[in-house]
Image (cartoon, rainbow, N blue to C red):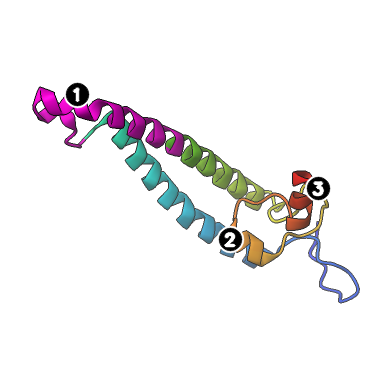
Amino acid sequence: MATINDENQEKVRYSDEELQEFKELILEKLAKAKEDYDMLKASITHSGSNDTEDTSPSFKVLEEGSSSQAKEEASQLAARQYKFIQNLEAALIRIENKTYGICRETGKLIPKERLRLVPHATLSVEAKNKLNK
């Protein structure tokens, strides 16, 4: 599939230079996402933190409820972060396949502005709005 730059026809895919720009953006976001994920995992498993284990038993009883709630929230955040990482990795594969930025519903290019905000997007805003109705 070649890029068509003729003014009368729509461009069918992003150029290699544009794909490289998106790849760099995604790699940055991926590194940050993995770092955040590791921090969330560490907070769930208490590695490297001072929790109620090192305080007196009376404080432990008071903190148990909030501690388990915090673990549950961290666990949910970690699950979301893991899914985000998977989506970013899938976007990298689409870049390698030169299918990145093409809406899976309409087949048209997703605008660069949307991809810069949501680099793992597979739907244009219009297609996403149709699905959400």
SS of the residue under disc 1: helix
Q: Do residues under tags 1 and 2 come within 8 Å of each other at their CB atoms?
A: no
Mark 3 or mark 2, which is nearer the start of the sequence? 3
Mark 3 or mark 1, which is nearer the start of the sequence? 1
In terms of image quadrants, where is residue 58?
Answer: top left
Q: On the image, numbered disc 3 is attached to which residue?
A: 105
Q: On the image, numbered disc 2 is attached to which residue?
A: 117
Q: How many marks?
A: 3
SS of the residue under disc 3: loop
**Mark 2 is on which residue type?**
Leu
Q: Residue at x 48, y 38 (%)?
A: 82
Mark 2 or mark 1, which is nearer the start of the sequence? 1
| Location of the N terminus (image quadrant) | bottom right
For label 1, the crowd category at 10 Å Cα-Cα, with few meaning under 14, some 14 to 19 and many 20 or more, is few
Return the residue nearer the eye: 11 or 118: 118
**Mark 1 is on which residue type?**
Val
| Span of residues in magenta | 48-77
Q: Position of residue 32 (x, y in %)?
A: 41, 52
For label 2, the crowd category at 10 Å Cα-Cα, with few meaning under 14, some 14 to 19 and many 20 or more, is few
Q: Residue at x 64, y 66 (%)?
A: 113
Q: On the image, numbered disc 1 is attached to which residue?
A: 61
Cα distance in 3D space between marks 2 and 3? 19 Å
**Mark 3 is on which residue type?**
Glu
SS of the residue under disc 2: helix
Return the residue nearer the eye: 28 or 76: 76
Q: Is residue 50 magenta?
A: yes
In terms of image quadrants, where is residue 109?
Answer: bottom right
Q: Residue at x 44, y 39 (%)?
A: 77
Cα distance in 3D space between marks 1 and 2? 44 Å
Compared with 20, 133 (above or below) is above
Residue 81 appears left or right of 64: right
Q: Residue at x 46, y 57 (%)?
A: 28
